Amino acid sequence: MIEVIGWLHALPDQVIYITVLLVVGIESLGVPLPGEITLMSAALLASHGAVSPWGVWAAGSVGAITGDSIGYLLGHTFGDNLLHLLGRLFPRHVNDRTTGAARVFFRRYGAKTVFFGRFIALLRIFAGPLSGILKMQYRKFLLANASGGIVWSGLAVWSVYFLGVVAEHWFRRFSWIALVVALLVGTVLTIIFRQRIEDFIDRHADEPPKA
């Protein structure tokens, strides 16, 4: 994330907004890019006055909604051939194991997967294409897609923005111990969350989807 912040900081304001929109949007097409990291990095820059948090929120929301909608259209048009192509290009992220688990999510929870999947990296890259492949009604998809994109982008931007605003005072008060504790807690929670996702994939990757 530090590298992304440094890279974004060197860009003009408008280019930062466009970069956030494009990275988030392309990730939503099914391409495994660091959309969430880019969004949060831009939000941290906003907390130091480099850009507007409203602009970052808007860019993240538009990127998420547009990218998922294009992914839906491509999935609806090309079907499983799109996943096969993505699998050849990004075999580490798009493979039988991950797509199998994603299909189980979609078959089981429908439009809820589009909304809540925005918060899970595995589902975020599959939400648009799989919704199209599985022929989800577009109106239902668009409602879940738009609301999920706006809420996800808003939570990511404003939580990081307000944390960034108070971080300097907070760390100055509690010294380096607080920083170490925060990093440890964040690392543990991340590991636990990732393990739960991996466990789900292991349980359901080979499960046949319900009709």
Image (spheres, rainbow, N blue to C red):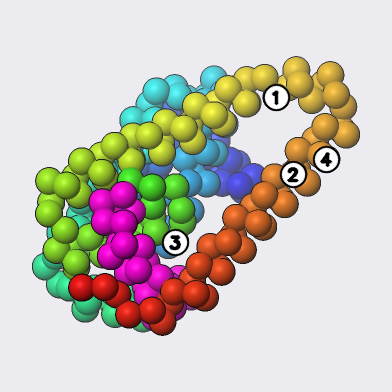
Image mark for residue 82: none
Cα separation, mark 1 vs mark 4, equals: 13 Å
Residue located beneath label 4 in the image:
180
Q: Hey, what amino acid is under mark 1?
A: Ala
- Are dots 3 and 2 in contact, CB under 8 Å? no
Q: Residue at x 80, y 35 (%)?
A: 179
Residue located beneath label 1 in the image:
167
Q: In the rendered structure, which disc, 2 or 4, sits on the residue that comes first in sequence?
A: 4
Q: In the rendered structure, which disc, 3 or 2, sits on the residue that comes first in sequence?
A: 3
Q: In the rendered structure, which disc, 1 or 4, sits on the residue that comes first in sequence?
A: 1
Cα separation, mark 1 vs mark 3, equals: 30 Å
Cα separation, mark 2 vs mark 1, equals: 16 Å
Q: In the rendered structure, which disc, 1 or 3, sits on the residue that comes first in sequence?
A: 3
Mark 3 Cα shell of 10 Å, populated few (<14), some (14-19), many (≥20): many
Q: Secondary structure at mark 4?
A: helix
Residue located beneath label 3 in the image:
122
Q: In the rendered structure, which disc, 3 or 4, sits on the residue that comes first in sequence?
A: 3
Q: Residue at x 64, y 45 (%)?
A: 2
**Side (left or right) of 51 relative to 25:** right
Q: Is residue 113 magenta?
A: yes
Res. 43 in view: yes
Q: Hey, what amino acid is under mark 2?
A: Val
Q: Secondary structure at mark 1?
A: helix
Cα separation, mark 2 vs mark 4, equals: 9 Å
Res. 95 in view: no
